[in-house]
């Protein structure tokens, strides 16, 4: 890996199972962290960055892999969140497999970017949702906001805060609501001397 970074997924109650999957196509050590809990599968990722062909091709391979994750466990609703480094149109593999961008289900915000280096800005950080095919449970975003106060002192990305709700097939709100915060790599101060 050419960069030093890491993904973190924190929970209050632990998980039934947590795994990590490294992307073989990554020159930067990119990977997925997957957590299974109470009818949810939450996947945290930091996809390949960059606009060169080799980086774009690696990101496309990673997105194709992520687009099929919902096939692994029919009874779970899926949340795919993180820094996708998506350029316009690159979300197509996810959309073809039935993933929904949670941001698009919310009322329009005045600003939607999560990364900015003047004069450029982009919405690289995303939360995608996928309903459970076998059980009929569905997931929806009931609240989403940008956490501007953390940018740019702790990260070069604006973090997102989302409240997600799983609805069983019979229609009543189900089980365990999920509060989710997504942001780019956080740089923590280190002690010296």
Image: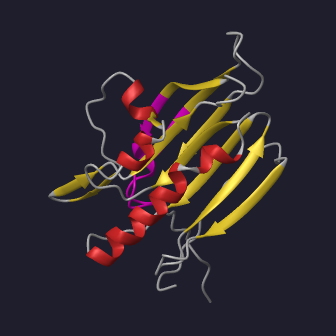
Foreground of the two, 46 or 22: 22
* x, y percent for residue 133: 64, 30
- As drawn, 163 above or below 183: above
| Residue 10 appears anywhere in the view | no
Residue at image location 72% in from the left, 10% down from the top: 170
Quarter of the image where the C terminus is located: bottom right
Residue at image location 36% in from the left, 48% down from the top: 91
Q: Indicate whether residue 183 is drawn in magenta.
A: no
When asked about the image quadrant of residue 134, the answer is top right
* x, y percent for residue 42: 65, 45
Horizontally, residue 176 falls left or right of residue 22, namely right
Q: Indicate whether residue 148 is drawn in magenta.
A: yes
Q: Magenta segment, which residues?
A: 144-162
| Residue 191 appears anywhere in the view | yes
* x, y percent for residue 142: 53, 22
Horizontally, residue 82 falls left or right of residue 179, namely left
């Amino acid at each position: 890996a050419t960069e030093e970074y890491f993904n973190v997924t924190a929970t209050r109650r632990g998980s039934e199972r947590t795994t990590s999957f490294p992307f073989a196509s990554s020159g930067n050590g990119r990977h997925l962290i997957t957590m299974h809990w109470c009818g949810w599968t939450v996947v945290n990722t930091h996809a390949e960055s960059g606009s060169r062909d080799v980086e774009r091709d690696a990101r496309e391979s990673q997105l194709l892999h992520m687009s099929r994750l919902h096939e692994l466990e029919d009874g779970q609703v899926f949340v795919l969140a993180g820094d996708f480094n998506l350029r316009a149109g690159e979300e197509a593999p996810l959309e073809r497999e039935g993933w929904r961008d949670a941001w698009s289900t919310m009322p329009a915000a005045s600003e939607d970017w999560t990364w900015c280096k003047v004069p450029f800005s982009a919405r690289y950080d995303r939360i995608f949702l996928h309903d459970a095919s076998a059980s009929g449970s569905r997931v929806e975003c009931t609240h989403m906001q940008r956490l501007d106060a953390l940018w740019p002192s702790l990260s070069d990305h604006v973090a997102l805060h989302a409240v997600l709700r799983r609805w069983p097939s019979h229609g009543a709100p189900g089980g365990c609501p999920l509060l989710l915060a997504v942001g780019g790599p956080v740089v923590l101060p280190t002690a010296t001397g």
